[in-house]
Image (spheres, helix red, strand yellow):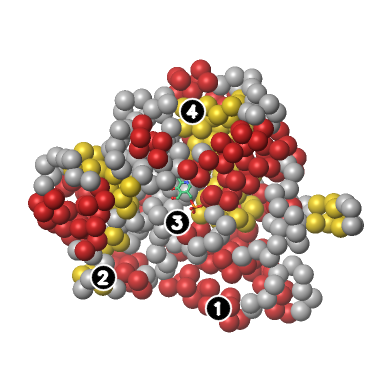
């Protein structure tokens, strides 16, 4: 790993210096949302104080500056994920909206009664419910890639599910419960051979590993700004140009139109066709700044640091009696339970000691039920976390377990 000054990185996140319940905050809920570096906060303030003005429509100076900043952000995001063209980048509110957009527009354009969609057993509700809704609307069939005993996706079963009626496969790059990386290269190539398109839910991957949508040959890729040190309320849908062009628009309104008559409208070109209404032109520049922050450290360095933390944490967790790690985590997230203690109780007692973790089904209720669990305690890492924080968490966890057993 290149020489990185982690203390310097940490100091760029003002919230990390605060205390909760008179204890130093240890923030291990990064899979839910990441904290924001000063440069992203500054960029947001700069946008509001220097060029806040509605974009694309104004002839005046501020509007032109804001438009340029927004469109430059689109280019930066395209570059970051290896998209060939910035018009393949659609601004959404987040991963959830990006997937809903595809489920609706792809569904209305390409799905007929009896067609099949495949998702996996580990999906977040965001990559499950929109497909259920689409299948209900279009009388299509939803198929699920099952898990093997080791919590890996069963690719043999996936192969058997694929057939000429399979129109789309939607899978998470990284599971937000298991922290396991799905073999998306293989899944994409198998799906394409069967003639199906593929959507990758990158909500838990893009901040932790290099993503190149062109190299992957993904048809769609979705992620959220707030999980990669950017603002909340902005997310990205990448789509291949020919598929996006063929799809009907998502919502109607300003921006997405070319000409409007009382009874008829022609639609704008990409990407605007899918961006009805005033876009989040402050969020876009904030997200672009967050990606600049990530690039300045290097995604490979981030991955290495987080892997070190994960290995260190697993070693320590495994020494606690009754510890059950769920699955085989390798990326950013560890889910666990201790004996018969309810995960919520552990979460509350960790919180009281300043350690922020997540408990419950993590918006993946079918997976948690499949695993026969009441929920899990989930810790998740970001670039600013340290081994010292893991030590604090382990000490707090031992205290919690002693009190609850
Ligand atoms: N997909 C996965 C794998 C996630 O972990 C999450 C959020 O935790 C989402 C989708 C939804 O992201 P958002 O709520 O930002 O739309």
Whole-percent x and y of residue 364? 41, 41
Q: Does the beta carbon at disc 1 come under 8 Å from ligand 1?
A: no
Picture residue at 59% right of the left edge, 39% below the top: 133
Q: CA distance from mark 2 to mark 1?
A: 30 Å
Picture residue at 38% right of the left edge, 52% below the top: 31
Residue denoted by label 3:
227
Q: Does the beta carbon at disc 3 come under 8 Å from ligand 1?
A: yes
Which secondary structure lies at badge 2?
A: strand
Q: Residues within 10 Å of mark 2 (few under 14, many from 20)?
A: some
> Left or right: 114 with respect to 352?
right
Which secondary structure lies at badge 3?
A: helix
Pointer 2 or 1: first along the chain:
2
Which secondary structure lies at badge 4?
A: strand
Q: CA distance from mark 2 to mark 4?
A: 42 Å
Pointer 1 or 3: first along the chain:
1
Between disc 2 and disc 1, the foreground one is 2
Pointer 3 or 4: first along the chain:
4
Pointer 1 or 4: first along the chain:
1
Q: Residues within 10 Å of mark 3 (few under 14, many from 20)?
A: many
Q: CA distance from mark 1 to mark 4?
A: 46 Å
Between disc 1 and disc 4, the foreground one is 4
Foreground residue, 399 or 304? 399
Residue denoted by label 1:
46
Whole-percent x and y of residue 34? 40, 60
Q: CA distance from mark 3 to mark 4?
A: 26 Å
Residue denoted by label 2:
20
Residue denoted by label 4:
144
């Amino acid at each position: 790993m290149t020489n990185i000054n982690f203390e310097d990185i940490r100091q760029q996140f003002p919230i990390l210096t605060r205390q909760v319940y008179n204890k130093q905050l240890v923030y291990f809920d990064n899979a839910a949302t990441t904290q924001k570096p000063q440069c992203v906060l500054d960029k947001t303030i700069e946008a509001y104080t220097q060029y806040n003005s509605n974009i694309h429509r104004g002839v005046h100076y501020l509007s032109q500056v804001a438009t340029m900043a927004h469109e430059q952000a689109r280019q930066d995001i395209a570059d970051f994920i290896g998209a060939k063209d910035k018009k393949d980048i659609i601004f959404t509110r987040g991963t959830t909206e990006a997937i809903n957009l595809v489920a609706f527009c792809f569904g209305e354009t390409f799905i007929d009664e009896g067609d099949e969609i495949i998702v996996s057993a580990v999906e977040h509700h965001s990559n499950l419910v929109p497909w259920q809704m689409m299948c209900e609307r279009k009388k299509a069939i939803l198929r699920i890639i099952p898990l093997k005993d080791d919590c890996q996706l069963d690719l043999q079963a996936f192969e058997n599910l694929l057939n000429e009626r399979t129109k789309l496969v939607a899978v998470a790059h990284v599971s937000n419960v298991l922290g396991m990386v799905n073999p998306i290269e293989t899944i994409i190539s198998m799906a394409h051979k069967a003639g199906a398109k593929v959507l990758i839910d990158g909500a838990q991957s893009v901040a932790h590993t290099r993503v190149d949508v062109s190299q992957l040959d993904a048809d769609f890729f979705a992620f959220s700004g707030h999980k990669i040190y950017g603002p909340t309320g902005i997310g990205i849908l990448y789509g291949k140009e020919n598929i996006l062009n063929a799809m009907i628009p998502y919502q109607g309104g300003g921006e997405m139109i070319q000409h409007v008559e009382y009874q008829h409208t022609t639609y704008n070109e990409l990407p605007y066709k899918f961006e009805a209404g005033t876009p989040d032109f402050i969020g876009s520049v904030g997200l672009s700044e967050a990606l600049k922050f990530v690039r300045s450290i290097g995604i490979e360095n981030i991955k290495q640091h987080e892997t070190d933390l994960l290995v260190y944490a697993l070693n320590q967790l495994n020494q606690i009696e009754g510890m059950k790690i769920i699955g085989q985590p390798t990326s950013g997230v560890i889910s666990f339970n201790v004996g018969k203690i309810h995960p919520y109780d552990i979460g509350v007692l960790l919180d009281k000691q300043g350690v922020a973790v997540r408990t419950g089904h993590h918006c993946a209720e079918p997976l948690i039920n499949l695993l026969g669990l009441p929920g899990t305690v989930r810790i998740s890492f970001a670039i600013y976390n340290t081994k010292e924080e893991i030590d604090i968490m382990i000490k707090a966890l031992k205290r919690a377990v002693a009190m609850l057993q």
